[in-house]
C-alpha cells in the first residue's frame, strides 16, 4: 500500500507543487481582507500590488485571478476602517442575509422580492431593527421617525417603478403615452430617448430611462 501511495504522489508531484503555489497566492489575497493585518489603505495597496503581479504573470491561472481581482476591487475596501460598516462586499452580502430572510418570512415567497431593492434605503433598517432591539417598539421610540422623508434615491426608484407599471398596463398605457407626448411637445424631454414601442406593441424603456424623472440632478446621456 505504501508503495502505491508513493507512486501516486510521484505521478502528481508537479501538479501538487503548482497547486501549493496557487494556495499561497489565494492566502496572500485573503490576508489583504483581514482587518488585523493593517489599515484599509495598507491592505488596499497590498491588494493592488498582488493584482498587478497576477496580471503580469505568464501563468493562465494567475492571469485569471488578476481579472477577478479587478472586478472585485471596487467593493472590497469601501467603508474605510469604521467597525460599524461592512468592511468589504463579502461582509455586505452577509449583512443582507438577515433582512432578506425576514422579508421572505413576511410574504412567504422564496425570493426576497424587488421591493427590498426599490425601498431598501428605509426598508432594510426596518427589517433589521429586531437584531439590535429584540423587544416591541413603543410609540415614543417611533414618533421621531413619523415625518422622516424617504431619501431621494428611494423616491426616484419608486417613481421609476410607477412609470414601468403604467407602461406594462394596457389600461394605463394610453394615459402614459399622452403624458409623454405632452412632455415632448413642451420640449422638456425627448420621448424617443426614453421609451420605444416594440413589434408587439409593448412600450419599453431604453437605457436612458433611468434619467426620466423630474428633479433628477444627474445629467442626461446624449
Image: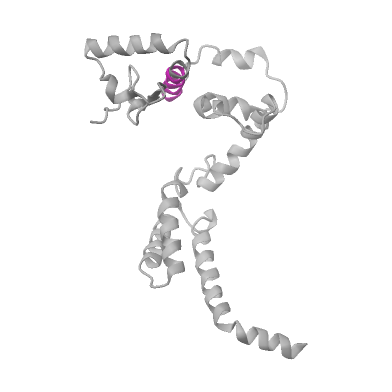
Q: Give the colour scheme shown.
A: one colour
Query: Quick check: 93 above or below 102?
Result: below
Image location of residue 60, percent across then percent down: 43, 69
* Closer to the camera in the image, 183 or 89: 183
Q: In the image, 127: left or right of 79?
A: right
Name the quadrant of the C terminus.
top left
> Furthest-front residue in view?
199
Count of marks overlaid on the render: 0
Please tell me which residue is depicted at 73% across the width and 91% down the height of the picture. Answer: 3
Name the quadrant of the N terminus.
bottom right
Instruction: State the image quarter where residue 58 is shown.
Output: bottom left
| 154 falls in the magenta region | yes
Image location of residue 203, percent across then percent down: 39, 21
Please tell me which residue is depicted at 65% across the width and 84% down the height of the picture. Answer: 9
> Furthest-bottom residue in view?
3
Q: In the image, 27: left or right of 166?
A: right
Query: Quick check: 144 above or below 112?
Result: above
Q: Give the range drawn in magenta.
A: 153-164
Please tell me which residue is depicted at 49% across the width and 61% down the height of the picture. Answer: 29
Prevailing SS of the magenta stretch: helix
Image location of residue 180, percent across then percent down: 32, 13
Instruction: State the image quarter where residue 96 is shown.
Output: top right
Image location of residue 13, percent across then percent down: 58, 83
* Closer to the camera in the image, 206 or 56: 206
Please tell me which residue is depicted at 61% across the width and 31% down the height of the picture. Answer: 112
| 130 falls in the magenta region | no
* Closer to the camera in the image, 135 or 91: 91
Query: Quick check: 21 above or below 168?
Result: below
Amino acid at each position: 500500500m505504501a508503495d502505491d501511495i508513493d507512486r501516486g504522489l510521484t505521478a502528481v508531484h508537479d501538479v501538487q507543487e503548482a497547486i501549493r503555489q496557487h494556495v499561497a497566492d489565494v492566502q496572500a489575497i485573503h490576508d489583504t481582507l483581514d482587518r488585523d493585518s493593517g489599515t484599509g489603505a495598507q491592505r488596499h495597496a497590498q491588494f493592488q500590488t498582488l493584482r498587478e503581479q497576477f496580471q503580469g504573470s505568464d501563468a493562465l491561472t494567475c492571469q485569471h485571478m488578476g481579472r477577478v481581482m479587478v472586478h472585485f476591487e471596487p467593493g472590497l475596501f469601501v467603508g474605510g476602517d469604521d467597525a460599524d460598516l461592512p468592511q468589504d462586499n463579502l461582509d455586505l452580502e452577509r449583512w443582507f442575509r438577515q433582512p432578506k430572510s425576514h422579508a421572505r418570512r413576511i410574504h412567504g415567497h422564496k425570493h426576497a422580492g424587488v421591493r427590498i431593492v426599490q425601498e431598501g434605503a428605509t426598508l432594510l433598517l426596518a427589517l433589521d431593527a429586531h437584531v439590535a432591539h429584540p423587544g416591541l417598539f413603543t410609540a415614543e421610540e417611533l414618533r421621531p421617525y413619523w415625518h422622516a422623508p424617504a431619501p431621494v434615491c428611494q423616491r426616484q426608484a419608486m417613481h421609476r417603478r410607477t412609470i414601468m407599471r403604467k407602461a406594462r398596463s394596457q389600461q394605463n398605457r394610453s394615459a402614459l403615452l399622452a403624458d409623454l407626448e405632452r412632455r415632448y411637445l413642451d420640449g422638456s424631454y425627448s420621448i424617443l430617448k426614453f421609451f420605444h414601442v416594440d413589434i408587439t406593441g409593448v412600450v419599453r424603456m431604453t437605457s436612458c430611462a433611468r434619467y426620466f424623472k423630474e428633479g433628477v440632478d444627474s445629467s442626461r446621456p446624449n
